[in-house]
């Protein structure tokens, strides 16, 4: 079952934000953590949901960033300024990336575009949501456990969608937070984006396949429960293989990287929900996957 409406998942977990960009609040006995940093335009939604759902914002001590793409770090600057004692956690690679002025400018520009494309510029203009280099990020690595006493969050390094990608797992109620390493529940299908290295991406999905899962908490398009959650990673492995074969087939017909990338972007146009990702980035992501699959890099 796929759930796309924000609200309570279980006694320790909430889905916040919107279906296009999902934030999860993990509530321990004494402290809480946000998982995923989402798109910047979620700030008004998150503040409203804290009140609507009766959530204690003061208990939030950490934000776990699963990778450093613009649509996964957007609310972090605002919340860090609102709560200066917040600890921001991410992989070593993400921590380094989020120190680079050019990267931060790109993140800010992309979030500004997404905010405008959703018609939310006026609603967000009162909030300071820009990343600046003074925001520090602490590092988590493969096998690290974030201990909340009654809950534990296990970290897996899962590169492929991005080099800095990690996933998280809460064994107490079998919740997996794969970000984009485990496929996404878009519409009625599963989609797979091994943007930085498709081969590493496929390895990362397989790394997650033996976990016992009752909830797939995706960074996009909501979360998955029940039988579908149990089988989701296996379906993602199959889908990733099918997409690899399609990329190979299209390039075999065109023998042209740019033409093939444009064709793939057209085929999967429905996966860019609300046009949040700028067209050139959407096409480029397919180009990068294609280059890896046909062995050009």
Image (cartoon, helix red, strand yellow):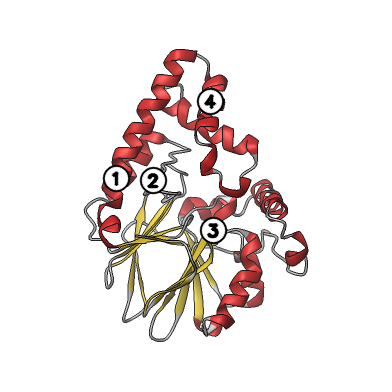
What residue is disc 4 on? 263
Is residue 276 among what the camera can see? no
* Secondary structure type for disc 3: strand
What residue is disc 3 on? 21
What residue is disc 1 on? 235
Residue 44, given in percent of the width and then of the height, sits at 66, 70
Q: Is residue 93 above or below residue 8?
A: above
CB of mark 1 within 8 Å of CB of mark 3?
no
Left or right? Give the position of 4 relative to 128. left
Left or right? Give the position of 94 relative to 188. right
Q: Residue at x 33, y 81 (%)?
A: 149
Q: Residue at x 34, y 60 (%)?
A: 1
Q: Earlier in the sequence, mark 3 or mark 4?
A: 3
Q: Earlier in the sequence, mark 1 or mark 3?
A: 3
Residue 121, given in percent of the width and then of the height, sits at 75, 59
Is residue 90 among what the camera can see? yes
* Secondary structure type for disc 1: helix
Q: Is residue 214 above or below residue 97?
A: below
Q: Earlier in the sequence, mark 2 or mark 4?
A: 2
Of the two numbered discs 3 and 2 in the rendering, the one whose residue sits closer to the viewer: 2
Distance Cα–Cα, label 1 vs label 4: 24 Å
Residue 88, given in percent of the width and then of the height, sits at 53, 67
Distance Cα–Cα, label 3 vs label 4: 26 Å
Q: Earlier in the sequence, mark 1 or mark 2?
A: 2
- Determine crowd level at label 1: few under 14, some 14-19, many 20+ residues with C-alpha closer than 10 A: some
* Secondary structure type for disc 4: helix
CB of mark 3 within 8 Å of CB of mark 2?
no
Q: Earlier in the sequence, mark 1 or mark 4?
A: 1
Q: Earlier in the sequence, mark 3 or mark 2?
A: 3
Distance Cα–Cα, label 2 vs label 4: 19 Å
What residue is disc 2 on? 190
Left or right? Give the position of 103 relative to 172. right
């Amino acid at each position: 079952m796929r759930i796309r409406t924000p609200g309570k998942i279980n006694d320790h977990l909430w889905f916040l934000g919107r279906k296009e960009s999902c934030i999860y609040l993990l509530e321990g006995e004494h402290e809480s953590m946000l998982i995923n940093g989402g798109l910047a335009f979620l700030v008004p939604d998150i503040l409203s949901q804290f009140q609507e759902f009766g959530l204690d914002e003061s208990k939030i001590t950490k934000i776990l960033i699963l990778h450093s793409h613009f649509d996964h770090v957007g609310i972090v600057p605002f919340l860090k300024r609102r709560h200066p004692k917040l600890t921001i956690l991410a992989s070593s690679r993400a921590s380094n990336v989020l120190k680079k002025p050019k990267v931060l400018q790109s993140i800010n520009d992309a979030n500004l575009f997404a905010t405008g494309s959703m018609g939310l510029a006026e609603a967000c203009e009162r909030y300071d949501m820009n990343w600046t280099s003074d925001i520090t990020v602490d590092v988590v690595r493969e096998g690290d456990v974030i201990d909340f006493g009654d809950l534990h969050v296990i970290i897996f390094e899962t590169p492929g969608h991005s080099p800095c990608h990690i996933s998280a797992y809460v064994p107490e109620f079998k919740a997996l937070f794969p970000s984009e390493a485990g496929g996404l529940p878009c519409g009625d299908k599963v989609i797979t984006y091994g943007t930085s290295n498709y081969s590493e991406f496929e390895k990362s999905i397989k790394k997650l396949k033996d976990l016992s899962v009752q909830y797939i908490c995706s960074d996009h398009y909501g979360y998955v429960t029940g039988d579908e959650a149990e089988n989701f990673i296996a379906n993602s492995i199959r889908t990733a293989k099918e997409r690899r074969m399609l990329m190979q087939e299209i390039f075999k017909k065109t023998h042209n990287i740019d033409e093939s990338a444009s064709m793939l972007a057209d085929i999967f146009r429905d996966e860019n929900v609300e046009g949040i990702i700028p067209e050139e980035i959407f096409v480029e992501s397919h180009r990068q996957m294609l280059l890896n699959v046909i062995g050009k890099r």
